Each structure stands twice: as C-alpha cells, then as structure tokens.
Amino acid sequence: MSVVSASPIGDLIELKWSDGSLSKFHNIWLRDNCHCSKCYYGLTKQRLLNSATIDPNIKPQKTELTNNSVLITWDQDDHVSSYDFYWLRLHSYQPRLVPVAEKLQDSDSLLKRELWQVKDIKDNLPSVDYNEVMAATDDNEEAIKDWSLKIWKHGFCFVNNVPVTPEDTEKLCEKLNYIRPTHYGGFWDFTSDLAKADTAYTNFDISSHTDGTYWSNTPGLQLFHLLYHDGEGGTTSLVDAFKCAEILKKNHPESYEIFTRIKIPAHSAGEEKVCIQPDEARPIFKLDDQGELLQGLGQHHFFSR
Ligand SMILES: [Zn+2]
C-alpha cells in the first residue's frame, strides 16, 4: 500500500492511501517518532531524541513523497524526517488501519498453548535432548527454540540425558537464560535436611502447588534435577494449572471469578533473617487486561484456620 498524498492540516498531517483510506498523524507525534540517525540509534533501536525539546507547535515546512516513504522537512532546525509507507500503515492510530490482532497473527498461532490432562499427554511427553540443547549456537538455535516452545505450550518439558552433576545442570539452565538469584542463591542444590524451614526441604509428600508466591516477581520457570535418590517415593507430579482454571471457569464460573478477584496475602519467613512478601497481595489467578489467564499462584504455604 502506498501513500498518494500528504496534506498538512493544522497540527496534523493527513495521509491518503492508494486504497482511498485516510490516516491522520499529529505533527508532534511524527517528529517524536523520527528514526533518523540523530533521533534514533538503529543499532540498539533506542531513541536519542528528548521529546521535551520538541516545540509543541512544530509544523511541516515541506512534505514530499518518494516511492516508499513520506519525507517531511520541519519548521524547527530544518530537520528532515523520513517515514516508510509500511511503517506508517502499521502505526496508523487515527484511525487504526491494521488491527492489533493482524500484527500478532503469526505469533498467536505459533504460541498457542496446548492445555492438557494426563490422558492427553502421557504417551507423548514433551522432551528434548541435553546434547542437542547444549550443541545449539547463536547461528543455530533450533534446539533452544524447540525447548522454549515446548515449555511455553505445555508448561513443562523434560530434558533427557543430563549428566547427573550440579555443574552440568547449572550449565543447562544457563543455556536457556541467566539464573535469577534469590535468598536461596542463584543455582542451588539441597537435600531433605530442613535447612530452609520449608516443607520442600523434607521428605514429606507435598501436594500440587506453585513456588515463590511470596515474591513480587513470581518465578515463571523452574528447573529441577534429581541428583541422588535412595529409598522409596520421590515421584514428581505435574498439573496443568491452566487446564484446571479452564475447567473451573466452565463448570463453576463464580468460583473462578472469586479466584481472579480475591487477593491472598503470602509471605516467607521460615528462616532467621528472611522475611519476604510481594509488593501487593494477588489473587490466585492473575489475568491480563484482556481477561486471559497469565499465571496461577497456588500456595503450599497457605492454610485456612
Ligand atoms: Zn530525526
């Protein structure tokens, strides 16, 4: 789609598109979004221009059209800005010409979550191979992409053939991302010695829960590796909390709604010198502004009395 005319009207510029549609851009908005090398550092895609230095009454001195862009010479400092047709179409806000959904269409289908119950997944558990993941390079990230997508879609992924040492496990974590340090340390290993006054440090059976509900930034991803096992039990069980939420919403909408609304305080104070709580209490189901579930916070530290 190309621009056939660019007409200044007061504090706006009206663009006419080849399909007859019109979009209006404010002068100050266009000047603020100039991507020339003085206003924008292309290498980091970060701005260099201080918005507060733009005269709010800035006007175009001249507008020109090239094959694929609109050139504007401003009445301030004779500054020349160039706006690509495609970029203008994509960012048109008055009116919006490209629906947000259209911009995100590809990522939507790629990132579609596959909620599961055991019967859906037990014969085909998402997994990747340690050696393939570790062999990934900046030029060939396919194995990392595969691993990340499986985690995103299913909420978990097994990694097979990891050498049974803390060092190799740590390297595996770092292959995916940096490790976020907490009061437990960055990467840490532990055993059932009650070191942190937490039931996770015992050999008790802990029912389904999510971890770290007492942090403002609750963990989005954790990696566990059983390094040594002597005795019975110790089975890991996994639950798709998003699937639970979906079923609850369908069968008991009122209960679901309560879980999205009522804020539950949480804290961790098991150890001496540790007292952690989130900056604000949050409901069990955290939603985005479209009402879609973002995160479930189910606590094993939570008891009603
Ligand atoms: Zn500029």
Image: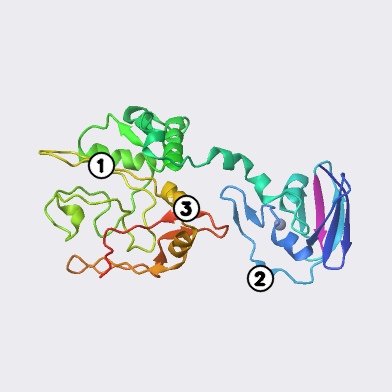
Which secondary structure lies at badge 2? helix
Q: Which residue is at 69% across, 58% downward?
A: 33
Region of the chain picked out in magenta, as a range: 69-74
Name the image quarter holding the N terminus.
Answer: top right
Residue 236 disc label: 1
Residue 29, percent from left and from top? 73, 62
Q: Which residue is at 23% across, 32% downward?
A: 163
Q: In which quarter of the image is ligand 1?
A: bottom right
Rendered image quadrant of residue 210: bottom left
Rendered image quadrant of residue 74: bottom right
Whether residue 263 appears in magenta in the rendering, the answer is no
Work out whether residue 131 can be spotted.
yes
Mark 2 crowd level (few <14, some 14–19, many ≥20, 10 Å Cα): few
Residue at the spot of label 2: 52
Residue 228, percent from left and from top? 15, 38
Q: Is residue 277 above or below residue 287?
A: below
Q: Nearer the viewer, mark 2 or mark 1?
A: 1
Residue 203, percent from left and from top? 14, 49
Residue at the spot of label 3: 251
Which secondary structure lies at badge 1? loop
Closer to the camera, 57 or 238? 238
Closer to the camera, 153 or 221? 153
